[in-house]
Image (cartoon, coloured by chain):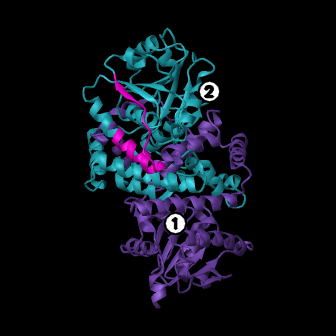
Chain colours: A cyan, B purple
Amino acid sequence: MSAEASSRPGKASVSTVAIVGGGVIGAGWIGRYLHRGADVRVFDPDPEAERKISDVLANAETAFEMLYGVAPVKGTLSYHSDLADAVAGAAIVHESVPERLDLKQRVHAEITGAAGPDTIICTSTSGLLPTKIQEGLDQPGNLIVAHPFNPVYLLPLVELVAGQQTAADVMDRAAKIFDAVGMKPLKVRKEIDAFIADRLLEAVWRESLWLVKDGIATTEEIDDAIRYGFGLRWAQMGLFQTYHTAGGEVGMRAFIEMFKPSLHWPWTKLMDVPELDDALIDAIADGVEEQARGMTARDLERQRDKNLVGILHALKANNWGAGTLV
Amino acid sequence: MSAEASSRPGKASVSTVAIVGGGVIGAGWIGRYLHRGADVRVFDPDPEAERKISDVLANAETAFEMLYGVAPVKGTLSYHSDLADAVAGAAIVHESVPERLDLKQRVHAEITGAAGPDTIICTSTSGLLPTKIQEGLDQPGNLIVAHPFNPVYLLPLVELVAGQQTAADVMDRAAKIFDAVGMKPLKVRKEIDAFIADRLLEAVWRESLWLVKDGIATTEEIDDAIRYGFGLRWAQMGLFQTYHTAGGEVGMRAFIEMFKPSLHWPWTKLMDVPELDDALIDAIADGVEEQARGMTARDLERQRDKNLVGILHALKANNWGAGTLV
């Protein structure tokens, strides 16, 4: 290994990675590994996959250059028409196919059949239980949830969840790989639907759907309520530390005392689930078009990445939170 | 007005502000106005109020200097032992007393009795309905909710909510004042409990309490799930624009299609409310102490402010979101 290679930012400790499914999440994984020097082997039956992945990788490369101030020293990217061929020889596999249990089970039967005995096999599922995906697999022991967040090439969080049949050392071995590519692996203690982050996101999503459906707020007003307010707090401290900090001299106990009664007030409509009918879908889809002011989703991706890099640099300057991983 | 004064950052368009209640929120309001040149008159019966407010103002002044690179040109701060005396002559009054309806009603009867006919009277309530607070007031017409976010001297969001008896022009007149002190006034279309932001925050708070209570995650793990993941997204785009951006080429409609089924999965425990018993309070309060690694709440305040300034500068460099108000 050359001196240049060993000093490059966030160098991966794995040499070969396989990606099964190259949508927004799969392509994000590719960027995360490829730009840190790993060889990445891709299987995606979509005939448009290579073009779509290339678009994401162009954004990911720009983001890497903004983040580290240097061009990435890339590994080799290869596309394979056969899943077993893509998986062969990989140290870690990431499956990012659509969120259907039967599909995931079928794909993992293929992956585990082709992978080596030490290959770590990850599913990017945002909420399905790994134990369910493991059902019916001949070799379920290396399977784990590694749930990343879009854009995967920039956001550090990855939630790790073991299933009942996951071997004891897989979580730690996976965490080591994620540490080496600048991520923040969060080992989830118990296996529950939607893990941690998506529990919180789903609660906000449901509440927000009500606000739109009931005509309380537009999508833009809800977004503004977040990004001009508590979103700025949550980029650097989370929920609890923010409230602890807001509790004045006494801290969290004072905060809880103050807001304890509101737990019993009707401050949420989450006792019920809104129906996502056409009218609500239109209100949301038209709302985000309106607030984009002519920017396409691709334009917004680039703007988002530029903003994320700026925030990560700001946190790095303070040696705090996600900035410590840059 | 001197040339120096007219060129200073975020100069207020009001000359005199009255603050009733100088806790974390009230003191934050003082910093927001005072450091933009307004004279601020304070009423708070707590004998410790002046000392506590001074601590917050020291932080606010440091934050202002970091944000704008210059020292604030301050207005005059005065403490008054009589509420009517504090309120007399103020263009706008902010009430930030504890969240008890009877107390708010009593205080607003005093405020409206002492205020001029054009004085805008704001309550900082995080969730009480302005119509309820207006009940029984002789002059309810100038009362409005102006709900800010801690730290008020740095976070721009302020939710404005009119009550049934609020006069037609009060919301617009208030919005103009908040614009002039670098805030983002969000006019809430309908009067509902907890408005917009606190609906979302309450949903996350309740879900998080369950995660701690059920032993799924510690407070630190939940905070990490936020600040290494979606918190970074929410500082710059909100919920809907983030998902629109994540929908790939098709945008929001693709995203909704993909995640529509999960609305009917058991991805939240919010059909029920956790009891905040001593064991849960201990788990939370001990958890935040542990994750603070010896930093006091005051230390954390300063760190938070430094981080917020960094994020605001990063967004300003991109001419985006909250950065456009700096």
Three-letter code, disc 1: Ile
x 69%, y 50%: residue: B292
The answer to if A73 sits in the magenta stretch is: yes
Asked whether residue A84 appears in the rendered view, the answer is yes
Picture residue at 36% right of the left edge, 75% below the top = B169
Chain to which the residue tagged by mark 1 belongs? B
* Residue where numbered disc 1 is placed: B133
Q: Is residue B88 magenta?
A: no
Pinpoint residue B49: horizontal percent, then vertical percent.
70, 73
Q: Indicate the quadrant where residue B98 lies.
A: bottom right
Q: Position of residue A282 (x, y in %)?
A: 26, 44
- Few, some or many C-alpha atoms within 10 Å of disc 2 (few <14, some 14-19, many ≥20)? few
Farthest residue toward the front?
A: A2
Count neighbours of disc 1 (C-alpha within 10 A) and say few if under 14, some if 14 to 19, many if 20 or more.
many
Foreground: B88 or A10? A10
Tell me the tag on residue A245.
none
Gap between marks 1 and 2 measured at Cα:
55 Å
Closest to the observer: B202 or A78? Answer: A78
Residue under numbered circle 2 = A172
Query: Is residue B163 visible to the viewer in this orientation of the structure?
Result: no
